Image (tube, helix red, strand yellow):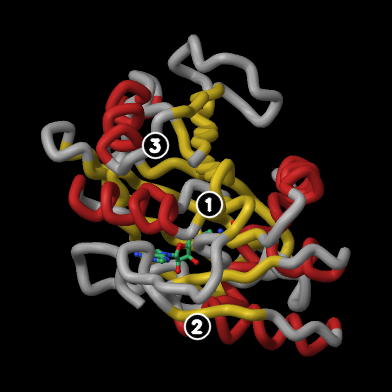
Amino acid sequence: MESNSATEPTPFDDGEFYDVIMGQMADYDLAFYRQLAREAGGPVLDLPCGTGRVLLPLLKEGIDIEGVDLSAEMLARLRQKAAELGLQPRVQQASFTDFRLDRQFALIISPCNSFVHNLTADDQIQSLRLCREHLLPGGLLVIDTFFPGSQFLATDNQRVLEGEITHPTTGNRLRMYDSRSFDRVKQLFDSKNEVEELDADGRLLSTRRFSTTIRWIYKTEMELLLRIAGFSRWEICGGFDRRPLEVETDGMIVFAWK
Ligand SMILES: C[S@@+](CC[C@H](N)C(=O)[O-])C[C@H]1O[C@@H](n2cnc3c(N)ncnc32)[C@H](O)[C@@H]1O
């Protein structure tokens, strides 16, 4: 699957590897979505569901949840994990901008900074419109993304060590680097990632490279997008604790009701 302008692989071309690099981050937001799903009192759509990081634990708890994702490889990994758990997930391969499901949802979630893969205003609006269409009256859309503060936008072309983890099966060290470049006019950033695998003696065994392009969104711009897509009530918070978004180092968690 390609979500970047270049022809390089994306992190979503290999679901198993995606799960490895998500590593210890795997459940950082799970309690938040579990609570929302329990409160929703109706079906839940996970958009995009990726390898089922959020969808599978909720399905296992008996929540009526289905998913959409563009990447066949991510969905293949989701199905493999579901089979191991004895679960039968409902998932569809489609884009944010053209999914069509046969029912409406009490809750639509877009976890882990995924909405920013919409690279144009047309796609952002189309995606929000489709979400609104797929919500039951009074239904809630929740989007987890980030606020593009000046600190975030200041790391041009520096190769930054983002983290180091242990590969869960080989036991080797994985060092994850990211180099970002920004087009501040188009609000696009390219992220070039390298993951180095090192043995116990620190010898470099392999380097995997992939890249993504995303489009960041400001708070007031998000409000305009929601308005254009037909939403009339929303709240934009700075974190999962629902504090108001007031400082530029905050996250950006969008709650929008139909
Ligand atoms: C950062 S991952 C997050 C996956 C999942 N939501 C999670 O929390 O683990 C981003 C996901 O967006 C999907 N994606 C990228 N562009 C997409 C598009 N246009 N339509 C639907 N899914 C897309 C990728 O395949 C990938 O699974």
Separation (CA) of disc 2 from disc 1: 19 Å
**Judging from the image, what secondary structure is the residue with disc 1 in?**
strand
Q: Earlier in the sequence, mark 2 or mark 3?
A: 2
Q: What residue type is labelled 3?
A: Phe
Q: Is mark 2 on a helix, strand or loop?
A: helix
Q: Residue furthest front?
A: 137
In the foreground, 251 or 135: 135
Q: Residue 73 carries which label?
A: 2
Residue 93 location, quadrant: bottom left
Contact between labelled residues 1 and 2, with CB atoms less than 8 Å apart: no
- The residue tagged 1 is 110
Q: Which residue is drawn at 53% across and 28% down?
A: 251
Q: Which of marks 1 and 3 is nearer the N terminus?
A: 1
Q: Is mark 1 within 8 Å of ligand 1?
A: yes
| Observer-nearest of 140 and 31 | 140
* Residue 12: % across, % down: 46, 71
Residue at 38%, 21% (x, y): give it: 149
Question: Do callouts 1 and 3 mark residues in contact (Cβ within 8 Å)?
Answer: no
- Number of callouts: 3
Q: Which residue is drawn at 37% across and 24% down?
A: 219
Residue 253: image quadrant is: top right
Q: Residue furthest top?
A: 246
Q: Name the residue under label 3.
A: 231
Amino acid residing under circle 2: Glu
Camera-nearest label, 2 or 3:
3
**Element marked by disc 3:** loop
Crowd rating for badge 2 (residues with CA inside 10 Å; few <14, some 14–19, many 20+): some
Q: Where is residue 85 in the image (x, y as percent from the top left)?
A: 85, 82
Mark 1: give few (<14), some (14-19) or many (20+) Cα within 10 Å.
Answer: many
Where residue 87 sits: x, y (%)? 80, 83
For label 3, the crowd category at 10 Å Cα-Cα, with few meaning under 14, some 14 to 19 and many 20 or more, is some
Does the Cβ of the disc 3 residue fall within 8 Å of ligand 1?
no
